[in-house]
Image: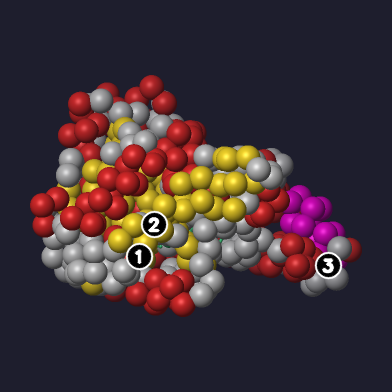
């Protein structure tokens, strides 16, 4: 079985928790795209883990965890994450890094900041991790792949060209910044080559064998549909395709082998960084949800923008990804509200829209049309079965199902691994598909 996990909003829906939950029955977990702009939280009896590059299945020693070809890997960050696991007594024997994956080079975060700086008021609010510049270089054919670390002569020649001929002139002439030292970069990366060598492989045979055996494979999308380079609120997006199609190209799993796409949705909406957000709440209710939901960025610590559940966004995500199953997370965060709103459509210049418009200035100026429902005003943290949830809570879930057009199979009622109401197991649904 192959299941793709995607974010259906603007990220931080709780994808890490869902991956961890489903990993118990998985053989292989693959991160197909993104970089250390992602922060996926997993909470177990050993405490809290925040994974940026390591797949969230890494805590299960029997699960092979792959950093796929579509990821941009900062070697410093992956090594730090490995070290952090070791400090907690865990050895990632089960980690494999695709030799086709590109690297975030030490100069990419520098360019990320410089590019944001010159954008001024139009800045995107990136995570400054160099992810956009690394993907840009991949497309321009001046990127470094992880496999290049194993070829010293090639690395030297390429660094001389890319850094000496491309990056340094830009730093000097455009930004008036100091020059990068090509030899220092080479030596730094040869050091990473030695440390990462045991993990670097061609992942094609490994993934094909898993498919031949009909193993259970999870594709762990990072970011989310509304941050997709093509389907998100361009240019306020990330540098990759976090939608289901990107999961295939970022891993080498053929689309024909995918059994299920599971969309992760938060029971309300959050966004980090700039760009349109029709249901954004700026007053006391927004602050209340932000505090109760600890909505502060996993990677940058920034306060996340908070808003009501936007069914236009979720409906669009269900369609773009072909999601036949939904995990609805953080429902418990709404426990104390007496009234809850769901945006079911947008009004713009006298017309009704049921999906986000491609034109972001229209999206910015549209009027969300809300359905208002009563809250349940009860603690749902200990609910494990559908029947345990209060009536008004079940009504809210059923409203979301009918608005977005897909069934809610998993319901997150708290941050811990066991805090799920499972209505239908996604592996079972995948098998039946
Ligand atoms: P991801 O990027 O999609 O993996 O999500 P993040 O880890 O960035 O953010 C989700 C946050 O919500 C984390 O702090 C999780 O521990 C937490 N979380 C996930 N699911 C639930 C839930 O159902 N209830 C509550 N209260 N917290 C949750
Ligand atoms: P996970 O996987 C939320 C946002 C940034 C910024 C935009 C572009 O944890 O859900 P980038 O550094 O990617 O060039 O920034 O994308 N962003 C995320 N927001 N969750 C994420 O990942 C994100 N990854 C990038 O805040 O608005
Ligand atoms: Mg996150």
Is there a contact, CB below 8 Å, between mark 2 and mark 1? yes
Of the residues tagged 2 and 3, which is closer to the observer?
Answer: 2
Cα–Cα span, label 2 and label 3: 51 Å
Q: Indicate the secondary structure of the residue bearing disc 3.
A: loop
Of the residues tagged 1 and 3, which is closer to the observer?
Answer: 1
Is residue 164 shown in magenta?
Answer: yes
Q: Identify which residue, 119 or 264, lies in the foreground.
A: 264
| Residue 248 horizontal/vertical position (percent) | 44, 33
Pick whichever of labels 1 and 3 is earlier in the sequence.
Answer: 3
**Measured along the vertical axis of the image, is residue 93 above or below residue 27?**
below
Q: Indicate the secondary structure of the residue bearing disc 1.
A: strand
Q: Residues within 10 Å of mark 1 (few under 14, many from 20)?
A: few
Q: Indicate the secondary structure of the residue bearing disc 2.
A: strand
**Measured along the vertical axis of the image, is residue 319 above or below residue 364?**
above
Left/right placement of residue 427 relative to residue 274 reads: left
Q: Quadrant of the N terminus?
A: top left
| Residue 303 horizontal/vertical position (percent) | 50, 74
- Which disc, if any, is residue 175? 3
- Which disc, if any, is residue 372? 2
| Residue 164 horizontal/vertical position (percent) | 78, 57
In the image as oriented, which residue stretches furthest toward the right?
173
* Residue 310 shows in the view: no
Q: Residue at x 63, y 51 (%)?
A: 366
The residue under label 1 is 339
Q: Residue at x 20, y 28 (%)?
A: 431
- Which disc, if any, is residue 308? none
Q: Main secondary structure of the magenta part?
A: helix
**Measured along the vertical axis of the image, is residue 244 above or below residue 142?**
above
Q: Identify which residue, 305 or 15, lies in the foreground.
A: 305
């Amino acid at each position: 079985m192959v299941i793709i996990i995607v974010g259906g909003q603007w990220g931080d829906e709780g994808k890490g928790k869902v991956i961890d939950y489903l990993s118990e029955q998985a053989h292989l977990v693959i991160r197909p795209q993104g970089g250390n702009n992602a922060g996926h939280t997993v909470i177990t009896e050993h405490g809290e883990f925040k994974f940026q590059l390591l797949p969230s299945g890494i805590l299960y020693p029997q699960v092979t965890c792959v950093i796929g070809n579509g990821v941009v890997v900062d070697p410093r960050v992956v090594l730090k994450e490995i070290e952090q696991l070791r400090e907690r007594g865990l050895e990632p024997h089960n980690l494999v890094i695709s030799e086709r994956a590109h690297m975030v080079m030490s100069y990419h975060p520098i360019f990320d900041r410089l590019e944001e700086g010159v954008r001024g008021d139009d800045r995107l609010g990136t995570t400054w991790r160099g992810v956009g510049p690394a993907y840009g270089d991949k497309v321009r054919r001046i990127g470094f792949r992880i496999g290049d670390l194993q070829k010293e002569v090639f690395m030297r020649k390429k660094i001389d060209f890319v850094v000496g001929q491309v990056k340094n002139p830009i730093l000097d002439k455009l930004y008036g910044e100091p020059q990068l030292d090509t030899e220092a970069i080479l030596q730094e990366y040869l050091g990473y080559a030695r440390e990462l060598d045991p993990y670097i492989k061609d992942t094609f045979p490994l993934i094909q064998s898993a498919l031949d055996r009909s193993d259970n494979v999870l594709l762990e999308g990072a970011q989310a549909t509304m941050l997709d380079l093509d389907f998100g609120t361009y240019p306020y997006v990330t540098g990759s395709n976090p939608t289901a199609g990107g999961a295939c190209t970022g891993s080498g799993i053929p689309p024909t082998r995918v059994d299920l796409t599971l969309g992760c949705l938060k029971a309300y909406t959050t966004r980090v960084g700039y760009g349109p957000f029709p249901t954004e709440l700026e007053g006391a209710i927004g602050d209340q949800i932000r505090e109760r939901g600890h909505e502060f960025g996993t990677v940058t610590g920034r306060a996340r923008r908070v808003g009501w559940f936007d069914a236009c966004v979720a409906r669009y995500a269900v369609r773009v990804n072909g999601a036949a199953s939904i995990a609805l997370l953080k429902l418990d965060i709404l426990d104390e509200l007496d009234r809850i709103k769901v945006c079911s459509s947008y009004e713009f210049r006298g017309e009704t829209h049921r999906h986000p418009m491609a034109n972001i200035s229209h999206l910015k100026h549209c009027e969300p049309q809300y359905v208002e429902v009563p809250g349940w005003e009860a603690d749902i943290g200990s609910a494990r079965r559908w029947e345990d949830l209060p009536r008004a809570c079940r009504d809210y879930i059923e409203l979301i199902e009918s608005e977005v057009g897909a069934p809610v199979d998993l319901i997150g009622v708290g941050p811990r691994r066991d805090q799920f109401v499972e209505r239908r197991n996604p592996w079972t649904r995948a098998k039946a598909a």
